Image (cartoon, grey):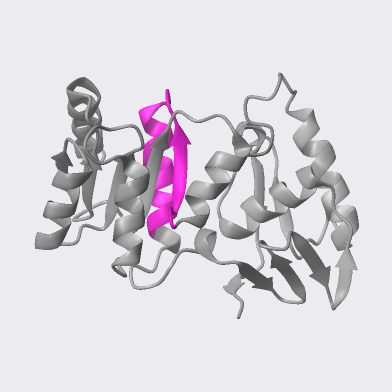
């Protein structure tokens, strides 16, 4: 499925750039590289790749500003940010600005490839990603990300901040298998050492709030030993 998929890799570290480009090439992608945001925008003016990998911390023009300029120009090429930011609020802001996903440095190259494949599966290069939508609708479930409110069948749901963050991430990554470690990173970040069983406990609470049956789930499916998947279609609300 990677055949002919074109990746623009943007990172100012020559060592990281070379090693990642080689790894992605072996994974079947056609890789072009740039050392900063200005070079990336110049390349994007000449042709559109299938996906852009953007390092956040770069000289001249950093990844966040490069992303903003792309989105302001109406370019919705899928973007994955390479970050070194531990705060959940900072990561959420990057997604709201139009990133399709992010991955924290350091990371395993295999994880990046898995994230690329997941983004390419759900991306529509002519439309904003779900991660940039303020209102998410999934059947009778509605999540207003700006107001931080959730309703089901018109009835408000009282969710804790952690439950809301979990639901938000699952809904912006529908039909994607997400491991417990990933959800720990998304919800708890670097706040403190938390065991993966904390994710299971919050998922159980979230399911109770949604009235979701674990044996015949409508929203959140458990994949034994691997993690969770949001299984109901999600649309951008208006």
**Quadrant assignment for the C terminus:** bottom right
Q: Position of residue 223 (x, y in %)?
A: 67, 45
Q: Position of residue 112 (x, y in %)?
A: 39, 37
Residue at (17, 57) in percent of width and height: 44
Question: What span is colored magenta in the figure?
Answer: 98-120
Judged from this view, the residue extending furthest toward the front is: 60
Residue 186 magenta-drawn? no
Tell me, yes or no, if residue 5 can be seen here.
yes
**Quadrant assignment for the N terminus:** bottom left
Asked if 17 appears above or below 141 in the picture, the reply is above
Q: Position of residue 98 (x, y in %)?
A: 44, 58
**Horizontally, is 193 left or right of 56 in the view?**
right
Residue at (83, 56) in percent of width and height: 215
Q: Nearer the viewer, residue 62 or 222?
A: 62
Q: Nearer the viewer, residue 84 or 210?
A: 84
Q: Position of residue 159 (x, y in %)?
A: 85, 53
């Amino acid at each position: 499925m990677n055949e002919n998929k074109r990746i623009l890799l943007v990172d100012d570290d020559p060592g990281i750039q070379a090693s990642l480009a080689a790894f992605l090439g072996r994974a079947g992608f056609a890789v072009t590289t740039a050392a900063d945001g200005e070079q990336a925008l110049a390349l994007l003016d000449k042709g559109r790749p299938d996906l852009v990998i953007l390092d956040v911390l770069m000289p001249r023009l950093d990844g966040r500003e490069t992303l903003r300029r792309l989105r302001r120009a109406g370019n919705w090429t899928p973007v994955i940010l390479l970050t070194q930011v531990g705060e959940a609020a900072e990561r959420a802001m990057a997604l709201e600005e139009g990133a399709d996903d992010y991955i924290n440095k350091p990371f395993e190259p295999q994880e990046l490839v898995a994230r690329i494949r997941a983004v390419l599966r759900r991306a529509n290069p002519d439309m904003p990603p779900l991660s940039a939508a303020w209102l998410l609708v999934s059947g009778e479930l509605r999540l207003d990300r700006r107001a931080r409110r959730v309703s089901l069948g018109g009835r408000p749901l009282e969710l804790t901040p952690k439950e809301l963050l979990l639901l938000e991430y699952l809904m912006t990554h529908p039909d994607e298998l997400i491991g417990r470690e990933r959800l720990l990173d998304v919800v708890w970040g670097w706040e403190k050492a938390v065991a993966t069983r904390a994710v299971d406990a919050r998922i159980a609470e979230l399911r109770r709030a949604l009235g979701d049956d674990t044996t015949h789930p409508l929203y959140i499916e458990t994949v034994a030993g691997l993690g969770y998947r949001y299984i109901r279609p999600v649309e951008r609300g208006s």
